[in-house]
Amino acid sequence: MSLSQIARSISPSPTLALNEKAAVLRAKGDPIIHLGGGEPKSKVPMDAIMSAVQHLNTAEIRYAPADGIPALKQAIIRYTQEHYNRSVAPQNIIASSGAKQAIMVALQAILNPQEEVIFPSPYWVSYPDMIKLCGGVPVPVLAEDGSFYPNINDIELRVSQYTKAVIINSPNNPTGAMYSEAFISDIVQFCESRNLYLIMDDIYHRLIFDGRRPLSCYKYAKDLSESSKLIVINGVSKQYAMTGFRIGWAVANKKLIEAMTNIQGHQTSGPSILLQIAAAGAMNGIQSSVENLRLTLENNRNVMISRLKAFEGVKVYPPDGTFYTFADFSAYEKNSNKLSNLLIDKVQVLTVPGKEFGLDGFLRLSYCGSLKEITEGIDRIKWAIDFNSPNELYIGDRKLVRDWS
Ligand SMILES: Cc1ncc(COP(=O)(O)O)c(C=O)c1O
């Protein structure tokens, strides 16, 4: 079979593959614990459901404008005012099929072949492949001090004549690190001074802990005119637990949004009108579900971190937000794929190997499930790799005996 060069350079999404694996094993009746997930388990807000049902009942579900329906754009304008203290016009907004598509269309609109995009490492699994899909070159940057918090010098050192954009995701998937106000201010001003696009992937910006407040990148921008190269990405997937609705958006200058709309118009004609109406319903409705989710996640994080800290040899970095923690298991096994496979095969716990995020020896563990899943999942991992624990473990009434070393 003859496939394009681009198709051959793209790997499957490891996190989506893991979800499928979990579903298959569950269907087989295996007592799976999924600590690899990327979606909250709370219910979709009732306002979203009611809005969608009302529209569905008209039995007229039609095409929508390629850049999004006015009602959703109005909700995004209000959101941007409330959470970023920034007034934008409808022409500064495009709604897409998830934040993922908003990022993808932005990259398609700005990248020429061989142009480079810099992003801190560890990074969200999709960035490198999205950049490659546009013919661009991904440039992941590890902080020189070995932390999950880059500084501006780390980024500056990697800038070349081919650099076109920087992507910042804070709080970060997979580490949960929320970057400091000083770093956000530095990166906004640095990109302005070098005339680079800055894509702020803010998909987790309200899911933060310990009294932290979301940051608005606009506060640090000197240029807020229509020539600004700041692109802010957000969506309903995580904060409203609406992953299956596939609605995200980008806010940027009008010319760029127009170019993105042209691209999206030929790709999908824009997201489904029904799902846009649901997203607007959630954003205009009662907001308590977001705070409830945030509180639940903060409590889950505390439980997972205290459990992991009791685990000798594992290095833990308490996350500032999101629903992931990125722990260093290299004292047990340096090859994270091997470790992740062992955990699935032996104790039916799904984790994501750190290698997928640019750092081997680590595992990404999600705490978006129930407390029972978190505690039992960590206990099973401990039993599987810590040979000081008893030789036998019960999963339900099944007795496991450790037969590996
Ligand atoms: C950092 C980051 N950006 C974007 C997305 C995509 O979000 P959506 O489901 O809205 O496409 C995800 C989803 O996992 C993510 O972790």
Image (cartoon, rainbow, N blue to C red):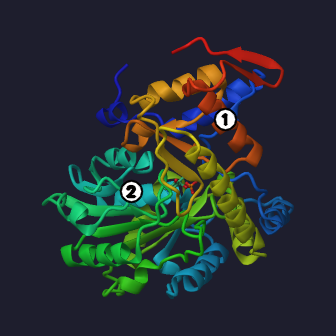
Q: Vertical placement of 388 versus 286: above or below?
A: above
Q: Most extreme residue toward the top, as rendered?
A: 403
Q: In which quarter of the image is the N terminus?
A: top left
Instruction: Residue 66: tell me if it is visible.
Output: no
- The kind of residue on which mark 1 rests is Asp
For disc 2, the neighbor class at 10 Å (few under 14, some 14 to 19, many from 20) is many
The residue identified by callout 1 is 379
Secondary structure of residue under mark 1: helix
Of badges 2 and 1, the one in the foreground is: 1
Q: Vertical placement of 369 versus 232: above or below?
A: above
Which of pointers 2 and 1 lies earlier in the amino acid sequence? 2
- The kind of residue on which mark 2 rests is Phe
Q: Quick one: 291 or 135, which is closer to the camera?
A: 291
For disc 1, the neighbor class at 10 Å (few under 14, some 14 to 19, many from 20) is some
> Toward which corner of the image does residue 169 lie, by quadrant?
bottom left
> Ligand 1 within 8 A of label 1's CB?
no
> Toward which corner of the image does residue 164 lie, by quadrant?
bottom left
The residue identified by callout 2 is 148
Residue found 32% across the figure and 37% down from its top: 6
Q: Vertical placement of 182 versus 402: above or below?
A: below
- The spot of residue 315 in percent (x, y) is 46, 45
Residue found 69% across the figure and 59% down from its top: 299
What's the CA distance linking mark 2 and mark 1?
26 Å
- The spot of residue 40 in percent (x, y) is 68, 53
Residue found 50% across the figure and 85% down from its top: 88
Instruction: Residue 38: tell me if it is visible.
Output: yes
Q: Quick one: 131 or 37, which is closer to the camera?
A: 37
Side of 283 where 227 appears, left or right: left
